[in-house]
Amino acid sequence: MQVPAPFEYQRVSSVGEAVGLLDSLGDTARLVAGGHSLIPMMKLRLANFEYLIDINELHGELGYVVTEPGRMRIGAMTRHRELLESAELAAAFPVFGDAESVIADPAVRNRGTLGGSLCQADPSEDLSAVCTTLDASCVIRGREGERVVSMEDFHRGPYETAVGDAEMLTEVRFPIRPNGSSAFEKVERRAGDWAVVSAGAAVWLDGDGAVADARVGLAAVGPNTAGIPGIGEELRGKAPTEELFARAGDLAAEACDPVTDRRGSAEYKRHLAKELTVRALRRSVARIGASGAGTPGAVQGTGGEGA
């Protein structure tokens, strides 16, 4: 039976207490909420910490979904199940519901948190792709107060984030823009598994039904989840056609850097990156039309799978 190396356990009841402990213990300590990624890594001795700081009591302080003019704020302790069931999120960012419905299983979704998923920084993690797609910003709190970093800068490498030893992620912020929608696509070997490849897309249309802006985020095709450069520039000002989606898919395939492993070859993953990007863009645009915003029947051109 595999067990973690010995560690001390601390339980905190406020963000200030958690930050204070992190400040005093340094890199010997790690926060734990759901623990579904951290504890297995500790059992395998891939991660070892002298102290685990249990922050589950912070759910009352950091478990929320709040809509404000121009943005949405989600607390880092908001659980997967709450994200899946949030009517506010479903209306503003349906990509969350798409992703949460294929993350792990109900037991994990009942305990795992948004902050825990992002801070684990696993290259195959789905919510990181969602947050990248939605141009999120991460609020990090330490002894000196708060600082805000973009999602693009939050992940610095596999299992490495911008959060310092005496800091913690407390909130994720999402800009809300009119006349847009989003979608998420994932290929996995079995239900609840890590992604072979996953893709999120968000599209906004102008008053004439052309693309005003678009973003795509991919997971499991490189050392970090990543936004695809050039997608917005390629689609902006053009009618949302199948040909345009295919071009965006080509950009996604060209930009990713997958490796061959037991989940598939690098060539297969590039193919998936292209196909899932096309599907996610298509569904995003179809959802704008279905909501009554933009131009009904927005997807133009020939071929392709229906939404």
Image (tube, rainbow, N blue to C red):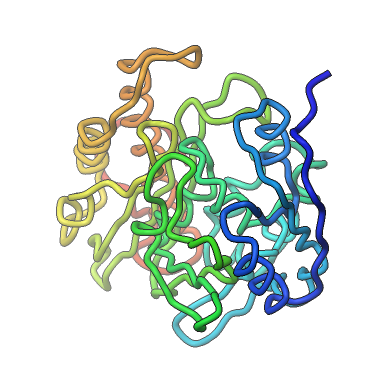
Residue furthest bottom as drawn: 69
Direction from residue 238 to residue 193 in the image, left or right: right
**Relative height, residue 28 to residue 194 (above, below):** below
**Percent of width and height locating residue 79:** 72, 58
In x, y percent, where is residue 304? 35, 31
Residue 280 lies in what quarter of the image?
A: top left
Residue 80 seen by the camera: no
Q: Is residue 146 visible?
A: yes
Residue 221, position as x, y percentages in the image: 37, 31
Find residue 203 and report its horizontal and vertical position in percent. 35, 58
Query: Image quarter for residue 70?
Result: bottom left
Q: Is residue 153 above or below residue 189?
A: below
The quadrant of the rendering that contains the N terminus is top right
Q: Residue 306 is drawn in which quadrant?
A: top left
Residue at 40%, 55% (x, y): give it: 132
Image position of 193 with respect to 136: above or below? above
Say whether residue 43 is left or right of residue 67.
Answer: right
